[in-house]
């Protein structure tokens, strides 16, 4: 099972990347306990910042950004983690999803997470991040994880570990229920779209016998 971890941290080291690492480790452990083999790949947005902006301004993408798109498209599940700014996700994080090809996230399970200075930003998960990914037709896991600065390196950090474990268990169940993602070639998508527009009146489509005449 392939996981793609999208992390939008703006600094190095990044608490956003730290949360993403912990979520990926917990989800991998849960899946492996149920007999799944896991391949995890990271999409770090900070090095792609200029390419993302160029794609927004010109409509053209370069190889490094195309590679990130392929990593997401090839995944069976996504872990997406953003820093919170002014009660919303970061501009870099949002911009990546703005230039991501349409339908990439359709029917794709996603676990969401966010980091911020204080707990008061935690509603970014439900008021900003979940609605955006639902709009993009992703299947968003019901339990999300928010981590404030105080959650890292303090005696109260154990509570974060529990939230991560619970969210990973939920996401593991979602991934196993959905199963491996059925990947379709762009040509297949174009054909299916055309058939929907035409109402598929020919009766000939993928999986149907051709007209003997």
Image: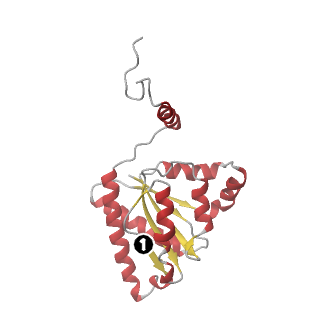
Q: Quadrant of residue 141?
A: bottom left
Whether residue 151 is visible here, answered yes or no, is yes
Give x and y (percent) for residue 105.
48, 52
Q: Position of residue 63 (x, y in %)?
A: 64, 48
Locate residue 21, reporting x and y percent: 46, 68
Which image quarter holds the C terminus?
top left
Q: Residue furthest bottom?
A: 155
Q: In this rendering, does residue 31 appear at all?
A: no
x 34%, y 77%: residue: 162
Residue closer to the observer: 86 or 35: 86
Residue at the location (50% across, 55% down)? 136
Reply above or below: 12 against 43.
Answer: below
Residue pictured at 63% horizontal, 52% vertical:
64
Looking at the rendered structure, the number of numbered marks drawn on it comes to 1
User: Circle 1 is placed at which residue position?
Assistant: 145
Work out whether 89 lies above or below 202: below
Q: Is residue 56 left or right of residue 159?
A: right
- Which class describes the residues within 10 Å of circle 1: few (<14), some (14-19), or many (20+)? many
Question: From the viewer's perspective, is 158 left or right of 48?
Answer: left
Q: Which one is in front, 186 or 34?
A: 186
Q: Residue 35, image x and y in percent? A: 28, 55
- Considering depth in this image, is 76 or 154 the residue closer to the camera? 76
- Above or below residue 113? Residue 211 is above
Residue projecting furthest to the left: 34
């Amino acid at each position: 099972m392939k996981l793609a971890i999208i992390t939008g941290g703006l600094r190095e080291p990044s608490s956003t990347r730290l949360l993403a690492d912990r979520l990926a480790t917990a989800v991998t452990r849960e899946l492996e306990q149920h007999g799944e083999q896991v391949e995890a790949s990271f999409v770090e947005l900070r090095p792609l910042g200029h390419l993302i902006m160029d794609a927004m301004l010109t409509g053209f993408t370069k190889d490094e950004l195309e590679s990130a798109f392929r990593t997401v498209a090839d995944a069976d599940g996504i872990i997406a983690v953003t820093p919170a700014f002014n009660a919303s996700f970061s501009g870099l994080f949002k911009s990546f999803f703005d230039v991501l090809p349409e339908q990439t996230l359709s029917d794709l399970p996603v676990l969401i997470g966010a980091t911020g200075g204080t707990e008061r930003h935690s509603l970014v998960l439900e008021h900003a991040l979940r609605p955006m990914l639902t709009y993009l037709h992703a299947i968003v896991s019901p339990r999300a994880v928010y981590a404030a600065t105080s959650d890292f390196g303090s005696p109260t950090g154990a509570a974060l570990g529990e939230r991560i474990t619970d969210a990973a268990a939920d996401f593991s169940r979602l991934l196993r229920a959905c199963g491996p993602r059925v990947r379709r070639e762009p040509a297949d998508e174009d054909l299916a779209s055309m058939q929907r527009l035409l109402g598929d009146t020919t009766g000939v489509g993928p999986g149907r016998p051709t007209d003997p005449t």
